[in-house]
Image (cartoon, helix red, strand yellow):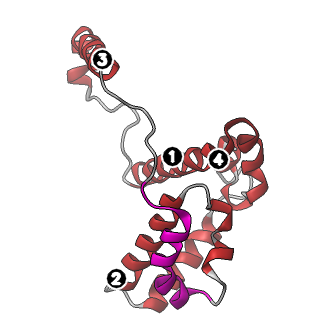
Amino acid sequence: MVRKATLAPARLAPADLEPVRAVAGDDALDYAVVMAAFHFINRVADLLHVDPEALPESLRRFEAFRRIAVRVASVLMRRMDLRVRPYPTSFPDAVARATPMLARTTALAPAEVLAPVAARPKVVELVALAIEERERSTVPRDTLMRIHRAVEAALPARREEA
């Protein structure tokens, strides 16, 4: 799924998540969100021509210091409680809160549209926040639509395009 998302994102389909779901169950949605975040950050970095080597050459001489810092960070992280906690909002509650916003953007029933992410109500809340942000934007709606269409059309569909 990661390879396809990198090389041919225009061809991604819900079926591409199924192998991950077979292994990770409902956690597959979390993997997809993390992957999307990394792709977003990488594309912005590419757009800004950020050097893949994050450290300037003048600072690379401190490799030993960097390694020590990584070890210290790993010791600190080991002591952190990183357990997954139950999400406080249920899917029906998240859909109920998002319905007014979703009703303005689609004629479909929100519960039906969002059923594939029922195991992760936080995804429903993220969608609602994205819609709210779009509605508050000062950019004219037709301009936003043109931007979205242009981005979708520009997504690579073949390895050669990536």
| Disc 2: which residue | 137
Crowding near the residue tagged with mark 3, few <14, some 14–19, many ≥20 C-alpha atoms within 10 Å: few
Q: Nearer the viewer, mark 4 or mark 1?
A: 4
The residue carrying mark 4 is: 26
Q: Could you tell me if the residues under marks 4 and 1 are in contact, i.e. CB atoms within 8 Å? A: no
**Which residue lies under the disc numbered 1?**
34
Whether pointer 3 and pointer 4 mark residues with C-beta atoms closer than 8 Å, the reply is: no
Q: Secondary structure at mark 2?
A: loop
Which of 140/81 is in front? 81
Q: How many angstroms separate mark 2 from mark 1 (CA)?
A: 25 Å
User: Which secondary structure dominates the residues rendered in magenta?
Assistant: helix
Identity, as a three-letter code, of the amino acid under mark 3:
Val
Q: Is residue 116 magenta?
A: no
Q: Amino acid at mark 2?
A: Ser
Q: Amino acid at mark 1?
A: Val
Q: Residue at x 25, y 29 (%)?
A: 56
Of badges 2 and 4, nearer the viewer stands 4
The residues colored magenta run: 88-106
Whether residue 25 is situated above or below residue 135 in the rendered picture: above
| Cα distance between the residues tagged 4 and 1 | 14 Å
**For marks 3 and 1 on the same chain, the one whose residue lies earlier in the sequence:** 1
Q: Is residue 146 left or right of residue 153?
A: left
The CA span between labels 2 and 4 is 33 Å
Task: Please tell me whether mark 3 sits on a helix, a strand or a loop.
Answer: helix
Q: Earlier in the sequence, mark 2 or mark 1?
A: 1
Residue 14 spot, x, y in % from top left: 74, 58
Q: Secondary structure at mark 4?
A: helix
Tag 2 or tag 3, which sits nearer the N-term? 3
